[in-house]
Each structure stands twice: as C-alpha cells, then as structure tokens.
Image (cartoon, rainbow, N blue to C red):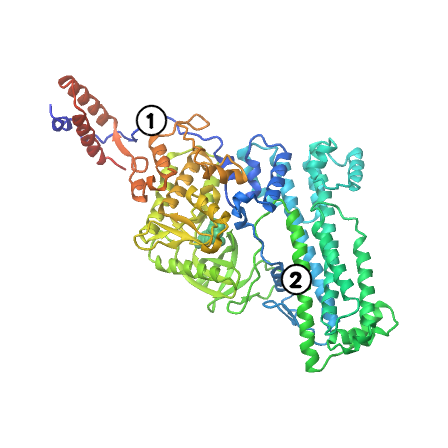
Amino acid sequence: MSTNSFHDYMDPKSRINARQFSDDEEFTTPPKLSNFGSALLSHTEKTSVSQELSNKDDKITKPVFEEMNRSSSRSHPPSSMGNLTSGHTSTSSHSTLFGRYLKNNHQTSMTTMNTNDIEINVGNSLDKSFERIRSLRQNMKEDITSKYTERRSKRFLISNRTTKLGPAKRASTLTSIFDDVPNSSSQLISNLRETTESPLDDPSETKKNSDYESINFGDLNPIQYIKKHNLPTSDLPMISQIYFDKQREENRQAALRKHSSRELLSKTRSSSTPLASSNSLVNKDNSITSNNNSQPRRKISTGSSSSKSSIEIRKVLKENIDADNYSNLKSPVHKIYKETSGYKGSDSEKREVLRNISINTSHADSALQQDNKRLKRSLDDAIIHDNENIKNQEVFYHRPAPKPPVTKKVEIVEPIKSASLSNSRSVITVNDSQYEKIELLGRGGSSRVYKVKGAGNKVYALKRVSFDAFDDSSIDGFKGEIELLEKLKDQKRVIQLVDYEMGDGLLYLIMECGDHDLSQILNQRSNMPLDFNFVRFYAKEMLQCIKVVHDAGIVHSDLKPANFVLVKGILKIIDFGIANAVPEHTVNIYRETQIGTPNYMAPEALVAMNYTQNNENRQEGNKWKVGRPSDMWSCGCIVYQMIYGKPPYGSFQGQNRLLAIMNPDVKIPFPDHTSDNERIPKSAIELMKACLYRNPDKRWTVDKVLSCTFLQPFMISGSIMEDLIRNAVRYGSEKPQISHDDLNDVVETVLRKFADYKI
Ligand SMILES: Nc1ncnc2c1ncn2[C@@H]1O[C@H](COP(=O)(O)OP(=O)(O)OP(=O)(O)O)[C@@H](O)[C@H]1O
C-alpha cells in the first residue's frame, strides 16, 4: 500500500466534535502553577520591594538580611562584575534635587531663584538669601528624610503584614497595604505596634521600647544587633526604626557641619590675599570632611561635634575678619563682614545690620554673584553629601532620583489650585499643546510615564525623561529612540508617537496610551491556574512585536515584560531605550553602554560587557555584543516565566544571577511538570529551548519560533484520530517492514494533512 492510499483514509469532513489537539497535549483539567504568582512577583523589575516576599519560607528577618546584603553589594560591587548593577541605581546630582525642590515648593514665591541654574541672586541682601537658602535646604532635607522614612515604614509594614499571608496572596495585598500606609513616623510606630505580634501597649514592651531608645548600635545594623543580643525577631521593626532615626539625625548633623564649614571656606577663599588662618581653616574643613568619610556608615553620631565645629568656624571667621590685610578685600561679602566686624551687638542684631546693608555698585554685584556661586557650590556639596548618606542607609529603594525639570523649552504650568483640586494635578505643555496629568502609569530607569488628557479629552501617555543635558551620548540615544519610533510609526505593533519635545536635560514624548504592560498582566494572573492558551496568546503577540522590529533591521536589546503594553487588545512595543539599527549585513551590533535587565539578558551580552568593563584597555570603549538572537533569548525568558513562574535564572539572587547567566556550566532546567505536577507540553519546552540556546547562532529566528508547534497547534477531531490509527494499523499489517524513508514520507504527508487543521 502506498503512502498516498494511506491519506485516503483521512477524512477531512470529520470536524464535528473537534477538540484542540496539539502534538502532545492531552489535558483533561486546566494545569496549575502553584508558585507562579510569588515567583513572578519576585522577578518583576519594577517591584524590588516585593522581591523578598516571594519565598514561601520567608521569615520576617529574611527580607531585611537580603536587603542588607544588596545594599552592601551595591556599595561594593565585585570587580568581576564591574558596574553591572549600577545602571539603574545611579543617583542624579542632588543639586538637581535642590532645584526640583525649589520648583515644587517655591516656584511662585522665590522670584530670586531660577530653577534651571539655581543661581542665587542676592539682590538687596545677601544675608536674606542665606537665610532663605538655609531654610529651604532644611525643608528640603526634611522632605527627603520624611520620604525615606515613609518608604522604610511601608517596607516594614509590608514585611509585618505579608509574612502572615501565603506567598501568592502577598502580591495582591501589596497595593492595598501601600494605600493605607501612614504618613508620619508616629503613625507608623502605632501601626507597627498593631501589626507586630507582641503588642507594644503591654507595659513590659513599653519599657523595652524606652530601653531600646538608648541603644548604642556601634558598627552594628539592626539585624546584627538583634542577633548579638539574642533579641526576639518581633522587635526588629522597632529597633530598626530607632536605628534609622539615629542615622537620620547623624546625617543631618553631618550635612549641617559640612555646609557651615564649606560656606565659610568659600568666603575666605574669595579673598585675593591669602589669609593668615586660611590654612588652618582648610585643614579644619578637610578634617571635618575626612571624619565624615572615614566614619563607618552605620555608626551613631555623638551629636556634639556639630556645635563644636561651628564654634571653631566662627572663631576662624573672626580671625579672618580682623586680619590686617582684610581691608584689601573687594568682595561685598567680606565688605559686609568688615563693616560689621566692629559691631558689638548680639548675633541677631548683627544679622539685622547685615540685612540692611545694600550693595549698589556693579562691581559689588558681580563679586556678589561670584560669592553666591561659591555658596551654591558649597550648598550643593553639602546636599550631595547629605543625600549620599541617606542613600547609603537606604536599603529598600534603589530607583535613582529623577533629574530636575528644565523649563527652557517645555514649561510646566501649575494650574490655579482650588481646595477641591488634587495637588498632583498639573498641566504640561509640549509644543504649545497642553496635557493634563491624570495618573502615573509607570516608571522606567530614567523616566516617568503619565496618563494625560489632551485636546478634545483624548487620552495619551506622556513619557517624561530626564537626562544629563551635557551628556552627548544620552542626547544621541534619545534622538535615536525618537527616530526609531518615527521610522516605525505605521507599524501596529509599535506604540505610536504623537508628538515630542526635547529641552536641555528633559524629553517629553506623547504616545498612544496603553492599558497595562505585560509585567502587570503577568502579575495579575500570578495566582490563577496556568493556562497554555494564555501563554500561547501572549507569546505570539510578543513575537509579532519582535518580528516587526527585527524586520525593520532593529535590535531592541532591552526586552522585558514591562516593554510591552496592551493597547486596545493589541500588544505593542513601547520602548527603544537602548535599541539600535542593525547595520546592513551585520549580525551583531555593539553598544556603548548596558542598561538591560539581568533577568532577561542574553549571556553573550553580559559576558561581553563584563569583559569590556574589566578590560584595562578602555580606549575602545565599553562595547558589548548584541544581536537579534539576544532578543530571542529575552523572549525565551519571558515565555519561561509565563510557564514556570520565574525566568530561567530567577532562583539566583543578586549578582549570583548574573554570574549564573554567564556561566555555561549552569544549565537551565526544563522540567516537564510544574511544581503542581501539571504537565508541560513538549512543544512548549521545544520553544523555550529553541530561544535559550547559549550559542546565539543556534537560537531560532523569530519567524521560526512563530511557526513552531506550540504556537501553531492542530485542531483535530476524535474521528480523524480514529481514522488515522485505523489506517496506520492496516498499513502496518500490509507492510510490516517499512523503510526509514517511507516512514518519513508518511509522517510528512500526515503532517501536511494536519496543516489544514491548524488553528
Ligand atoms: N504608551 C504607554 N502606555 C501605557 N503605559 C506606558 C506607556 N509607555 C510606558 N508605559 C508604562 O511606563 C513604564 C515605563 O516606561 P518605559 O519602559 O518606556 O520607561 P524607560 O525609562 O524606558 O524604562 P527602562 O529604561 O527601564 O526600560 C512601562 O513599563 C509601562 O508600564
């Protein structure tokens, strides 16, 4: 019997009772994936806070231990890893924070301050400006510290509350927990009391609390302290709160010390003649600085050094003012001090005199400006130092602070606020069109994306990117991204760019607005049963997006779930942050920098980057290799996460994950069952393996993956199957010896027939 006669038995009409039937899928009940939610949550790039909550066996201490480890590893990355982890954690200049603060809080009242340049124009009275600056700075510091406190508070609340829940439940409770997090520390303490297992209104506990207030931590962090003194873990939140309060106070003192010494130093340095005591002042300043630097990060301050150093500084100032050659000084600042040096009144009276001295000459104005610039620098330094301290003690939050808004081209107009209007509402003008903010949609490495309302109440997504205005490579990068978005404007799989405007250090993109990104969608489904139709649908959607990008000769190179948004039911790529055009006939391209997310990054990209970062010969730049196969790897990681609940190397934490991805000896497991003992179709495993070959050359192309069996399953009926088996048996009885070639023929023919039943 020929193979052709075999086909005659295939009855194409038998579509009645059709059921979905893949090459190896025989599901009777929907598969489940127990750890999908928690594991997924732990690898979502945006919710680092929730990472530690994912482990079922987490104790209250574990998240904190891990954060401590992370914190220390951020501060001291191993040389082998270079700056791998620093990409997303670099902080922006804190002078920019100062500028932002001015903008947010004093835009209308501070007419003498320009947020672009933070130029302090003293105008009538230098001292008045000093006072303002000091108070602003103080407010700003309080603002910053209260925000950090609040974050820590949230963190502890989450630890306390979520450790009592199952791992999958924790994800869903995160949002609601954040919603009712208290704003003030006192409220925090009271909430902590409610949520910790041992009530603090117990007299013995209250006593313990007051005992703890006098803790001297020395070099220990709260965890170490608890371990050393064998204290119960339930005391950790309280001890940590005390610890952080002490830290904050120490930072405040250090910043104040530094500020006042710098300020003085800048005044004395402005003298054209060296002052007799300037060296001693410099030494003092240095010693203050070095004290701060050499101080162990978590050491608790004694608190008295600040006033001591300010007395010393005043003394030096007096010496400077009294110096004979002081009369040669031209600077108005010194002039003021000179004029008031003989004044015998109290400090406040003296300040009043200073305030009333007006400086009218043009020379004085320019000299004043110089003094002011110096002052501004010293303020910036102090703020940077202060915030570095805060950053060092910050263990739960590692998003870099956004850079300051620059309003040269794009102006942000705060609407007139009425009591009924929310404070967060504002209108952003881009190319003369106004957009009203509705809500924050998401945050990226250097951006915030808002849902906004434009003309005719049309809803858009407004992406606001801050970058270093003087960093040419950033500017080129953003221009490149805009070019790519414009190039792919007509593609349905790429988010549509409506308008954009680029100013110094700031870029606004107006795009069509998506509903949810893929990372949010995966989170939503985290505690639902695994559904291969869901996996199939989103894998296909994602591959369609990648296909458009690859066909246009572009490598995205930063693919992760958060880079895909669902716009009215269609998944689209939103971000080309580090994407680049692939030169003609070139398989790979080289990037100057790396910003990808390690969870989804291909090994060749990490290996090459690690090599160049550790390579002493940096003349050739930090270049790393990335090509279309790198995107396929990322795609494989996302499908893997959808099926197994976490990316391939998701079980590794921190830098171990990076090392594991780069290490060819660490193989990716492809279990054929989930942890809930649900069977995983071979076709799905085949797809994942095809994308996750270590060797980029072996990885399947996007077209090949799109046509694989898992994504293109057959829909055949039971009767077709019956016919097939009957024919096979008959065929076998008539032709017991079948050659290999004949068998292949039969298989191919049957598969061709089946193609009619692809769904
Ligand atoms: N057009 C859009 N519609 C809806 N949400 C969006 C849109 N663009 C961005 N978002 C949301 O904002 C988040 C951050 O956006 P985006 O990835 O573009 O920022 P990014 O700075 O490029 O981030 P990264 O550098 O980390 O990739 C997205 O994950 C998504 O949740």
Q: Quadrant of the N terminus?
A: top left
Decide if ligand 1 comes within 8 Å of the CB at mark 2: no
Other residues around mark 1 within 10 Å, as few (<14) / some (14–19) / many (≥20): few
Residue at disc 2, secondary structure: helix
Q: Residue furthest bottom?
A: 361
Q: Is residue 701 left or right of residue 357?
A: left
Mark 1 is on which residue type?
Answer: Glu
Which residue carries the number 1 mark? 26
- In terms of depth relative to the viewer, which is nearer, 601 or 35? 601
Please provide percent x and percent y for residue 536: 36, 38
Q: Quadrant of the C terminus?
A: top left
Please provide percent x and percent y for residue 162: 60, 36
Decide if ligand 1 comes within 8 Å of the CB at mark 1: no
Mark 2 is on which residue type?
Answer: Asp
Residue 380 circle label: 2
Residue at (83% x, 64% y) in the render: 315
